[in-house]
Amino acid sequence: MAIRVTVWGENVHERENKVVAGLYPEGMHRAIADALNTDAGVSASTVTLQDPEHGLTAQKLAETDVLIWWGHAAHGDVADAVVDRVCEAVWSGMGAIFLHSAHFAKPFKRLMGSPCNLTWREAGERERIWLTSRNHPIAAGLPDHFELETEEMYGEPFGVPEPMETVFVSWFQGGEVFRSGLTYKRGAGSVFYFRPGHETYPTYHNAHVQRVILNAVKWAHNPGARLAEPSAAPNVPVDQALEPITERGPRLHQNGEEGFR
Ligand code: ZN
């Protein structure tokens, strides 16, 4: 069965900015999904901020193997209830890929637990992306380095936790460098951050970028069953311990009690 991908698009600048609309007439989310759908092993659909519940109902998330998120101008408009739902889905095993300015998306910040800040400059600089993890599945089929002729600069320090693996680093014409491909495990879910994709440049039409995103979808896909209650913290009563034990000392809680959260 094909990997079910949902591409979430903020869909604001595509409708309000002529340059962005010219590059992505049907939205960046559509361009990303169309590229993914050229692979027979993937079935990608799109939802946007403007859809009811931002398109991310409980049912849609249950039917999503990998969620891709692009947002920039309207991070604050994303409902906290939807953020909760997305994070629960990741913790229960859904894959998630956050692109470019989604470093400040609410679910990404929640999953990282850190400021996720960086330095930046919008000057159409050349970006050279270097592969730093040979044979990593997300780098499959890519050259040791490739270039995007015009991109926004993102520079270190990038305020994220140390990743499991850094798959790519970027160099920019102005001299800055940035860890531009990072993998994380959050609960049972795999998370990938990929830097390129400023909306005024044709980045998502680039074959190497499309390849990275396709590889990342396959990497983040978890074929196992989703955890039913990823946040459960059950008490194990004394009489259910795997080895017989005798209770000692004072106690605050009763057997089987819910506990504080
Ligand atoms: Zn940008």
Image (spheres, rainbow, N blue to C red):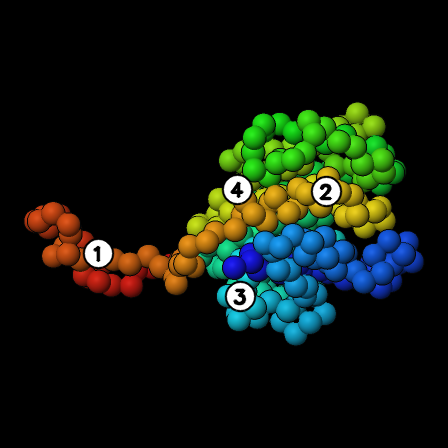
Q: Position of residue 160 (x, y in %)?
A: 59, 39
Kindly indicate the quadrant of the structure image that contains residue 215.
top right
Element carrying mark 2? helix
Mark 4 or mark 3: which comes first in sequence? 3
Mark 4 Cα shell of 10 Å, populated few (<14), some (14-19), many (≥20):
many
Whether residue 72 is visible here, answered yes or no, is yes
**Which circle, 4 or 3, is nearer the viewer?**
3
Q: Name the element at disc 4.
A: strand
Q: What's the residue type where badge 3 is placed?
A: Glu
Q: Which mark is in front, 4 or 1?
A: 4
Q: Position of residue 196 (x, y in %)?
A: 74, 42
The disc placed on residue 184 is 4
Q: Residues within 10 Å of mark 2 (few under 14, many from 20)?
A: many
Residue behind mark 1: 236
Q: What residue do we see at 56% from left, 47% from top?
A: 218
Residue at (84, 64) in percent of width and height: 15
Q: Is residue 177 visible?
A: no
For marks 2 and 4, the one nearer the N-term is 4
Mark 1 surroundings within 10 Å by alpha-carbon count, few (fewer than 14), some (14 through 19), many (20 or more): few
What residue is disc 2 on? 209
Q: Amino acid at mark 2?
A: Val
User: Closer to the observer: label 2 or label 1?
Assistant: 2
Q: Secondary structure at mark 1?
A: loop
**Cα–Cα span, label 3 and label 1:** 32 Å
Does mark 2's beta carbon lie closer than 8 Å to ligand 1? no
Q: Quadrant of residue 49?
A: bottom right
Residue 253, image x, y percentages: 22, 58
Is the Cβ of the residue at disc 2 closer than 8 Å to that at disc 1?
Answer: no
Cα gap from disc 2 to disc 1, whole angstroms: 48 Å
Residue where numbered disc 3 is placed: 63
